[in-house]
Amino acid sequence: MAIILTDEEIGNLLIEVKPLPDDWKKKLGLQAKQDAAFRHRGLTVDGVSGKHFRIIIRQAVNNPEDFSIILMFMASDGTEYRLSRFNGRHPSEHTNRIEKLGGQPNASFRNVFHIHRATERYQLAGRSIDSYAEPTTAYNSIDSALAHFLDLYRFTHQAEFLPLFHPPGGSQP
């Protein structure tokens, strides 16, 4: 049985810096299998603390706005936890069950861009860790969703940090 992650643990995993390999764009380039309804790809990345994460991307072949970009945490015992899902517009309805049971307005939505987030309370209620979701206007395509995802969850590329002190082609003291 999986251990329940606290909201604090989830938050720490999300903000951990996760360096991307040099060929990350190639490794995340979507590929379709013959007769498959979705194109997909994945990439494993180690955070600076040594924790293991995986990015999984899938996109419907017939509906490019139906996609998911998933952040997985892979615990040392082999358990995988979905920390977040950036979803595109898909025709099925999403319902936040705890909010619906509490009679809260806007507990359900359909066919909008939305972000699923892992929560402790959904785990404690016996639901999937990332059952809670909110509509978003932070992206409007798979490309803008990936850019926002990588930025929000602190995926970095070494070239982003260079040069540390001297501009390219500049003289050194």
Image (tube, rainbow, N blue to C red):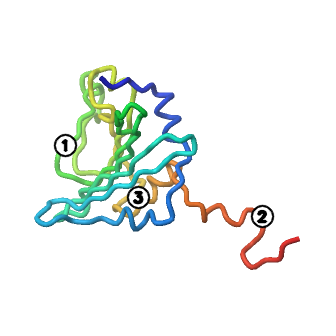
Question: Looking at numbered disc 2 in the image, what kind of residue is underneath it?
Answer: Phe
Across and down, in percent, residue 39 comes to 23, 62
Of callouts 3 and 2, the N-terminal one: 3
Indicate which disc residue 93 carries.
1
Across and down, in percent, residue 157 comes to 55, 60
SS at circle 2: loop
| Category of crowding for the residue at label 1, using alpha-carbon neighbours closer than 10 angstroms: few (below 14), some (14–19), many (at least 20) | few
Eyeballing the image, is 69 above or below 75? below
Looking at the rendered image, the quarter that the N terminus falls into is top left
Indicate which disc residue 146 carries.
3
Eyeballing the image, is 44 above or below 140? above
Question: Looking at numbered disc 3 in the image, what kind of residue is underneath it?
Answer: Leu
| Category of crowding for the residue at label 2, using alpha-carbon neighbours closer than 10 angstroms: few (below 14), some (14–19), many (at least 20) | few
Q: Nearer the viewer, mark 3 or mark 1?
A: 3
Question: Looking at numbered disc 1 in the image, what kind of residue is underneath it?
Answer: Glu
Eyeballing the image, is 34 above or below 13? below
Tell me the residue at 72%/75% (across/down).
168
Tell me the residue at 84%/72% (across/down).
172
